[in-house]
Each structure stands twice: as C-alpha cells, then as structure tokens.
Image (cartoon, rainbow, N blue to C red):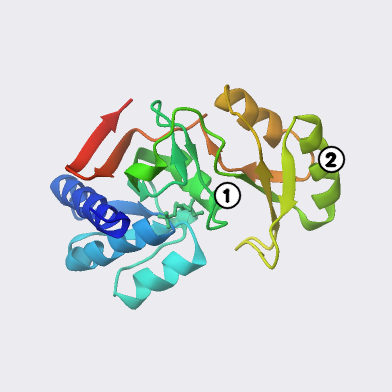
Amino acid sequence: MAQNEMKKAVARSAFEYVESILDRDTIIGVGTGSTANFFIQELSKISDRIEGTVASSLESDKRLKALGIPVYDLNSVGEVQVYIDGADESNEHLQLIKGGGAALTREKIIAAASEEFICIADESKLVHVLGKFPLPVEVIPIARSYVGREIVKLGGDPVYRDNCMTDNGNHIIDVFNLDIMEPTKLEERLNNITGVITNGLFAVRPADRLFLGEDSGVRILQR
Ligand code: 5RP
C-alpha cells in the first residue's frame, strides 16, 4: 500500500472509532498535517452529529470550518473526549516526536487536555529509538541563539527553521543528531531552558493508542 493510502486507512479507522463513541456532547480534538487532513475529511460526514471540535492549528481550524464542522476555543469547552493527530515518529511506548508542521505547542495542549489521545500514522513513522526525525523546539524569537547554545550543550545540532512563524508568533529550531534514549527526561530538560515554549517530544503525555497503517491493513498498538 502506498504511504497516502495508509494515511487514509488510519484516518478512516480513527473516524470509525470516533463514530462508535459519539454522543451529542462530544468534542473532538483535531490535529494538524496530511494524516489529520484525511481525518477531517472523514469527520465532515458527521458534522451534524457532534457538538464540535477544537483545532491544533489555524490551518486545521480553517479546513474544519470550510467543511461545516464547528470549531471552538479550547477555553470555552469542558472536556475533550478524544484527540486524533498524526506524528513524525513513534516508538513502541507510543512516545512521539511531533511538530514537523510547526503546530507542536497547540498539539501538546490539546493532548494534555484530552481524555484519550489516538495517534494515526503510516508504518514509516514507527521507530525503535526516537531522534532520526529532527526534534522541533518552539522558541520565543529573541531567545533563539541562547536556546541554540544550550541545545548544543545537550549534544544536539540546532538548525533554525527558515521562514517559519508558528501560530503563536514564535520560531522553530529543529534539533538534529539526538539519540533519544530517555524521552521523558529530555522533554523536561528542554522545556526548562529559558525561552523555550515547548518541544516536540510527547513522552510525558504519550498517545494512548497508535493506529498504524501497514501493507496488510491497520494495526492498533496500545500502551
Ligand atoms: C504537525 C505534526 C504532524 O502530526 C506531523 O508532522 C505528521 O504529519 P503528516 O501527517 O503530514 O505526516 O506534528 O505539527
């Protein structure tokens, strides 16, 4: 199966799951990226049967609204029952690297606020050790050089992402050459650097389930 077909297949499986737990009050967290976009497409089939969504980026917000799906500010909703989003990498413990699309901070907030977090990804995203994909770090613009120097001390190679302004008005540093053996510790350590908004490790709050698209179909991994 081609990569895009796998992405479509996991988006469909996530949609079927959401449909099975749905009631009129359900608020669904919706992520960002090409896999999440396939999910948004599926979700439009039941836009009249859900209370609404919260979006992890302005881009997803726009797509959802264009399809007639209500989008709320996270502050104005109570509970988010389920959050569906893609990832750049996942290990077997469902700890993730996210932020390839620069939406990591809002994604992390929605993941934290959600009862259940389902990650949808094609099989190329499953790795033994996180870190081949450069780890995105969102930084306050004036702290960029300072944060870069601190990251070098941790053994990473920071590269400023050109022409990228996040939805929160910040910059992204992509960190190369990290072998992430202790994801939770590194996540906390990076977040402690002054000027860092957050980093793309989702280890403190990993996914609860991973719907993985494979040649033979969708495999579900659970923590
Ligand atoms: C955006 C993300 C995405 O989930 C991640 O980049 C995966 O994208 P895609 O589904 O297009 O492969 O974290 O910030």
* Some atom of ligand 1 lies within 8 Å of the CB belonging to the residue at label 2: no
* Nearer to me, 189 or 68: 189
Quadrant in the rendering for residue 157: top right
Q: Position of 143 compared to 35: left or right?
A: right
The amino acid on which the numbered mark 2 sits, given as a three-letter code, is: Arg
| Figure check: 12 above or below 164 | above
Residue 30: name its quadrant: bottom left
- Secondary element under disc 1, as helix, strand or loop, is helix
Mark 1 surroundings within 10 Å by alpha-carbon count, few (fewer than 14), some (14 through 19), many (20 or more): many
Query: Does any portion of residue 111 appear in the rendered image?
Result: yes
Residue found at x 24% / y 62%: 43
Residue 166 in the image: state x and y as whole percent. Answer: 63, 61
Give percent across and percent down for residue 181. Answer: 57, 22
| Picture coordinates of residue 185, whole percent (x, y) | 62, 23
N-terminal-most mark, 1 or 2: 1
Instruction: Say above or below: 45 vs 6.
Output: below
Amino acid found under the numbered disc labelled 1: Thr
State the separation of the CA atoms marked 1 and 2: 22 Å
Tell me the residue at 57%/36% (across/down): 131
Q: Is residue 182 left or right of residue 92?
A: right
Which residue ends up furthest to the bottom in the rendered image? Answer: 66
Which residue is the extreme one toward the left? 20
Residue on which disc 2 sits:
149
Residue 95 image offset from top left, x and y in percent: 46, 32
Badge 2 element: helix
Q: Residue at x 64, y 33 (%)?
A: 178
Quick one: quadrant of the C terminus? top left
Residue, x 79% and y 36% (percent of image)?
A: 152
Of tags 1 and 2, which is closer to the observer?
Answer: 2
- Mark 1 in CB contact with mark 2 (< 8 angstroms): no
26 over 62 or under it: above or below: above
Residue under label 1, please give it: 105
